[in-house]
């Protein structure tokens, strides 16, 4: 069962600051990354990342819906930036024999590992 804490307005500020820190730390300056609030993320996650790998553009969305947070903002930020780090590899690999689903599952596994070490 996921542990939850009450969502507060300052969590986005913490989330955004950590995203910017990790973007700098991982050298992702060649990406145009926007960090934004999102009223409701469909899968009810705390955050999600959408991207265009060829254009090196990404949007990191923080779920600003009233309710509960299941991941601390710092951990969620590390996780989303880790996705951006791996996106080019995932994009290239998806043009090979593996299915997009198989690659997405592997990307999620690596992001979970990286969020623990970043």
Image (cartoon, grey):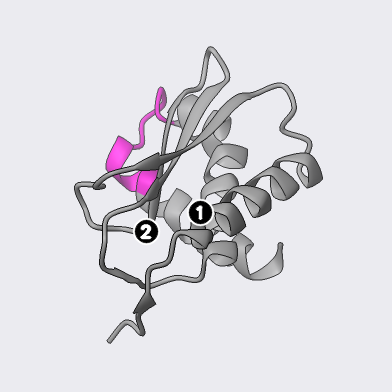
The residue that appears at 78% across and 40% down in the rendered structure is 24
- Helix, strand or loop for disc 1: helix
The residue that appears at 71% across and 49% down in the rendered structure is 22
Question: 59 or 37: which is nearer to us?
Answer: 37
Q: Locate residue 59, reporting x and y percent.
A: 47, 31
Q: Is residue 99 visible?
A: no
Q: Between marks 2 and 1, how big is the CA–CA gap?
A: 10 Å
- Helix, strand or loop for disc 2: loop
Viewer-nearest of labels 2 and 1?
A: 1
The residue that appears at 78% across and 36% down in the rendered structure is 27
First along the sequence among labels 2 and 1: 1
Classify the position of the N terminus by image quarter.
Answer: bottom left
* Residue farthest left in this picture: 42
Instruction: Specify whether 27 is left or right of 31.
Output: right
Residue extent of the magenta highlight? 94-104
Q: Quadrant of residue 97?
A: top left
The numbered dot on residue 46 is 2
Q: Locate residue 115, reporting x and y percent.
A: 60, 63
Asked whether 45 falls inside the magenta stretch, the response is no
* Residue farthest top in this picture: 55
Q: Locate residue 105, reporting x and y percent.
A: 36, 53
Q: Which residue carries the number 1 mark?
A: 12
Question: 84 or 7: which is nearer to us?
Answer: 7
Disc 1 crowd rating (10 Å Cα; few below 14, some 14-19, many 20+) is many
The residue that appears at 37% across and 59% down in the rendered structure is 46
């Amino acid at each position: 069962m996921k542990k939850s804490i009450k969502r507060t307005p300052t969590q986005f500020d913490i989330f955004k600051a950590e995203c910017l820190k990790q973007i700098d730390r991982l050298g992702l300056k060649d990406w145009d990354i926007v960090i934004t609030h999102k009223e409701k993320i469909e899968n009810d996650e705390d955050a999600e990342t959408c991207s265009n790998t060829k254009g090196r553009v990404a949007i990191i969305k923080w779920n600003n819906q009233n309710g509960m947070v299941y991941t601390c903002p710092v951990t969620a930020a590390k996780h989303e930036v880790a996705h951006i780090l791996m996106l080019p590899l995932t994009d290239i690999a998806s043009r090979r024999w593996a299915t997009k689903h198989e690659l997405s599952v592997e990307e999620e596994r690596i992001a979970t590992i990286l969020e623990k070490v970043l």
